Image: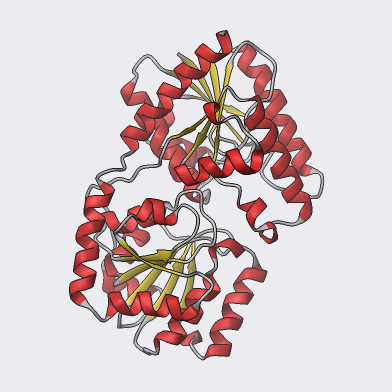
Amino acid sequence: MRVGLNLHFLTPGAGGAGRYAREVVGRMLELDRSLEITSYVSKDAEPGFLAGLPWGGDVDWVRLPVGIGGPPGHAALEMGAQMGLLAASAVRRRLHVVHGMANVAPIGGGRFARVVTLLDITWIHQPEVMDWRARAGTYAMALMSARAAHRVLAISDTARRDFVTHLGLDPARVLTVPLGVDAGVPSRTLDSEALRDHFDIGPGPIVLCVAQLRAHKNIPVLVEGLAALGREDVRLVVAGAGGSEEERARVWESAERLGVAGQVRLVGRVSDEELEGLYGAAACFALASRHEGFGLPLLEAMARRVPVACSDRSALPEVAGDAAELFDPDDAGSVAAALRRILDDDARAAALIERGLERVRGFSWDRTARLTLDTYAQAIAARRA
């Protein structure tokens, strides 16, 4: 099977979408040795980063002549490259199926099947996450891609229902393919004490949040929850690439107004080794998003024996199951109560750790890859029909 993957979004700072691509592509190649993959990336994709992927030498790389982001009107160029130029290349390469792994796939042209993964539709539920131009472009690309696809992949049942309800998609064409987690012991990490010194965290319990500084991630409520917790020894550490200066300012405004600025660390993008070190040092993991298509960091924390507290909204309760303390992401008191149940009750924290280890057994990247390959076969059959 000859497969084209739209990885125009793939950069070192691509967040959960990048993790999804990095993990699934390699697993698919392992599961089907006859698979031939053409990976389409932006013109700005770093050669060293692509070559450093474990499967980087096993695929054909094609650069689309458009970068990521830019001045007003650039979204139209990105749309044309991912929907038009990519389709033309797929025809020349006689691909059987093209899969857009993050919301965008060709909408026509060529005798190839089309699959698209919609990660979420946060921009519908929380329009403030983008300006109106970006929101309009994202909506147009996602909606056209989904309606033209032979199969649409949702990464949770919650997201699947969302797409059917808000995008009017045919339920028969929308399939749930959950994400996975690597439950193995990390091979590289940093000593927790060195890490505390490096990020100026100091001693005391760490509440870790792995998330971009974007509005729907709702970081300010974690700051408010920290203040309501009333413990000066606790540190809130937020690690994640991207985000706007406006959102960063909102976080600091909350921290300074509530008198906990000295307890908050926004460390930005971190290396894999630093992230593993932060998980190793954390007493608790917290995610306060108002909307998520999945919530991969929950599983990553559970796999690393970190007790989890998270929002009770969108897909997060589905992913967390009974292995997390749930809280209302619009109520700082609810956040503080959930953190207190973990930080002040060793027995409760230990129980959550054990439930978390059991929970992650139900999610694997191998399963994600197998289900994805199955959808390719279904999409090819649907196109022929």
Looking at the image, is 101 positioned above or below residue 29? below
Total labels: the figure holds 0
Extreme-right residue of the structure: 73
- Residue drawn where x is 42% and y is 31% of the image: 25
Looking at the image, is 157 positioned above or below residue 271? above
Q: Nearer the viewer, residue 87 or 308?
A: 308
Q: Nearer the viewer, residue 235 or 135?
A: 135
Across and down, in percent, residue 55 comes to 39, 31
Across and down, in percent, residue 51 comes to 45, 35
Quarter of the image where the C terminus is located: top right
Quarter of the image where the N terminus is located: top left
Tell whether 277 sits left or right of 317.
left
- Residue drawn where x is 27% and y is 54% of the image: 303
Looking at the image, is 362 positioned above or below residue 256? above
Q: Nearer the viewer, residue 243 or 48?
A: 243
- Residue drawn where x is 47% and y is 21% of the image: 376
Across and down, in percent, residue 384 comes to 56, 8
Res. 138 image quadrant: top right
Across and down, in percent, residue 286 comes to 40, 67
For residue 170, say whether it is visible: yes
